[in-house]
Image (tube, grey):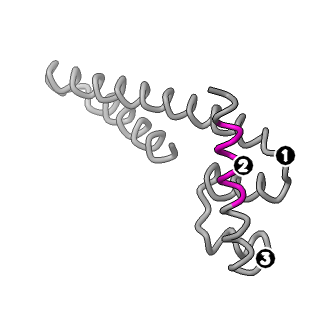
Amino acid sequence: MKDIEAHLHRLEAEAQEERSNTPEQQLNLKTAQNDLTEEFRTLSKERYELWTLICKIPNDVERTFLENRYYFGMSMKEVIEGMRYSEARIYAIQRNAVKSFCQVFSKNK
């Protein structure tokens, strides 16, 4: 999402700085901006839905793992270091967390 936001800002700056563009170029910039805005809205909605499902996980450790790994996008190395469990333990937590998430997800269909 940060990439989309950055690209949107870049497009806005281009559109404002380059007023001498042809109408076709302005239309292309506006179309690209609209497409990115729509993609951003979709991703924001999906992130919110993911967050609401993660919050329903009853186990604190599993919920923390899911937040770190799948919501905040941390690498496994960062998760292992951040949660301060052994690598083997983190992978066991991941396995259980994904099972819990699937159960919550299937209940919310």
Q: Amino acid at mark 1?
A: Pro
| Residue bounds of the magenta highlight | 96-105
Amino acid carrying label 3: it is Tyr
Camera-nearest label, 2 or 3: 2
Q: Main secondary structure of the magenta part?
A: helix
Q: Earlier in the sequence, mark 2 or mark 3?
A: 3
- Disc 3 marks which residue? 85
Q: Which residue is under mark 1?
A: 58
- Decide: is 3 above or below 32: below
Q: Residues within 10 Å of mark 1 (few under 14, many from 20)?
A: few
Q: Position of residue 19 (x, y in %)?
A: 25, 25
Q: Earlier in the sequence, mark 1 or mark 3?
A: 1
Q: Is residue 68 above or below residue 9?
A: below
Residue position marked by numbered label 2 in the rendering: 100
What type is the residue that disc 2 sits on? Ser
- Does residue 70 appear to the left or right of 18 in the view shown? right
- In which image quadrant can residue 24 be found? top left
Quarter of image, res 87: bottom right
Q: Do the numbered discs 1 and 2 sit on residues whose CB atoms are within 8 Å?
A: yes
Gap between marks 2 and 3, in whole Å? 19 Å
Camera-near label (1 vs 3) is 1
Q: Is residue 24 left or right of residue 94?
A: left
Q: Is residue 28 above or below residue 51?
A: above
Mark 3 surroundings: few (<14), some (14-19) or many (≥20) residues within 10 A:
few
Q: Is residue 10 magenta?
A: no
Mark-to-mark CA distance, 1 and 2:
8 Å
Q: Position of residue 40 (x, y in %)?
A: 48, 32
**How far across and how far down the image is residue 106, in percent?**
64, 34
- Mark 3 secondary-structure assignment: loop
Mark 2 burial class by Cα count in 10 Å: few <14, some 14-19, many 20+: some
> What residue is at 51 percent from the left and 34 percent from the top?
43
